[in-house]
């Protein structure tokens, strides 16, 4: 089963609207959850189709129903990735989600 490979722990950070003391709105990333997944370098065709050819792109496989959205940031250790695409794969008893992510940078501690 693919779930046997879900060994990397990710934290999900999602942009949310905030208001400062002078009623100015801004966005800030807040922790929205965590999940286990499997990280692997994305196939060249997938990277090319998404127009990510000048970045480092990866696929992350995780459990079906994982609360991750396009635009979220996922963090593993001190490395962060931007979620560029989410695809549900419903294949028999092996349902899972594939996230296409782009390497951001070393995350702040």
Image (tube, grey):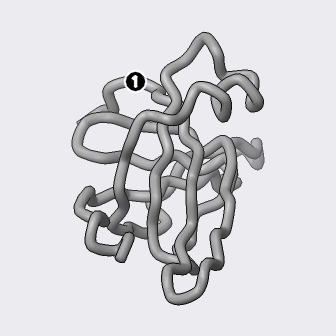
| In this rendering, position of residue 46 left or right of residue 79 | right
Q: Point out the residue furthest to the top here.
A: 54
Most distant residue in the front direction: 92
Where does residue 31 sit, x and y in percent of width and height? 44, 60
Q: Relative to 64, is 21 on the left or the right?
A: right
Task: Provide the secondary structure element on which disc 1 rests.
Answer: strand
Front residue (pair 74, 16): 74
| Crowd band around label 1 with a 10 angstrom C-alpha radius: few (<14), some (14–19), many (20+) | few
Quarter that holds the C terminus:
top left
Q: Can you name the residue that lies furthest to the bottom here? A: 93
Seen in the picture, residue 28 relative to 92 is either above or below; the reply is above
Which residue corresponds to the image point at 51% horizontal and 35% vertical from the top-left?
42
Left/right of residue 29 with respect to residue 6 in the rendered view: right
In the picture, the quarter occupied by the N terminus is: bottom left
Q: What is the x, y in percent for residue 30?
A: 50, 56
> Which sits in the foreground, 79 or 85?
85
Instruction: Identify whether 99 is placed above or below 94.
Output: above
Which residue is found at the position 33% from the left and 33% from the top?
107
Q: Residue at x 61, y 78 (%)?
A: 91
Res. 33 image quadrant: bottom left
Up-down: is 25 above or below 37?
above
Viewer-proximal residue among 103 and 60: 60
Residue occupying image coordinates x 49% and y 22%: 56
Numbered marks: total: 1
Residue under pointer 1: 105
Q: Estimate the x, y position of residue 50 in percent, counting from the top left.
A: 74, 31
């Amino acid at each position: 089963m693919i779930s046997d490979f879900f060994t990397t722990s990710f934290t999900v950070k999602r942009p949310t609207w905030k208001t400062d003391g002078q009623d100015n709105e801004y966005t800030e990333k807040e922790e929205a959850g965590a999940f286990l997944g499997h990280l692997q370098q994305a196939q060249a065709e997938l990277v090319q189709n998404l127009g990510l050819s000048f970045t480092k792109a990866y696929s992350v496989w995780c459990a079906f129903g994982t609360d991750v959205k396009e635009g979220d940031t996922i963090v593993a250790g001190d490395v962060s990735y931007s979620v560029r695409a989410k695809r549900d794969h419903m294949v028999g008893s092996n349902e899972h989600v594939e996230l296409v992510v782009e390497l951001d940078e070393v995350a702040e501690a």
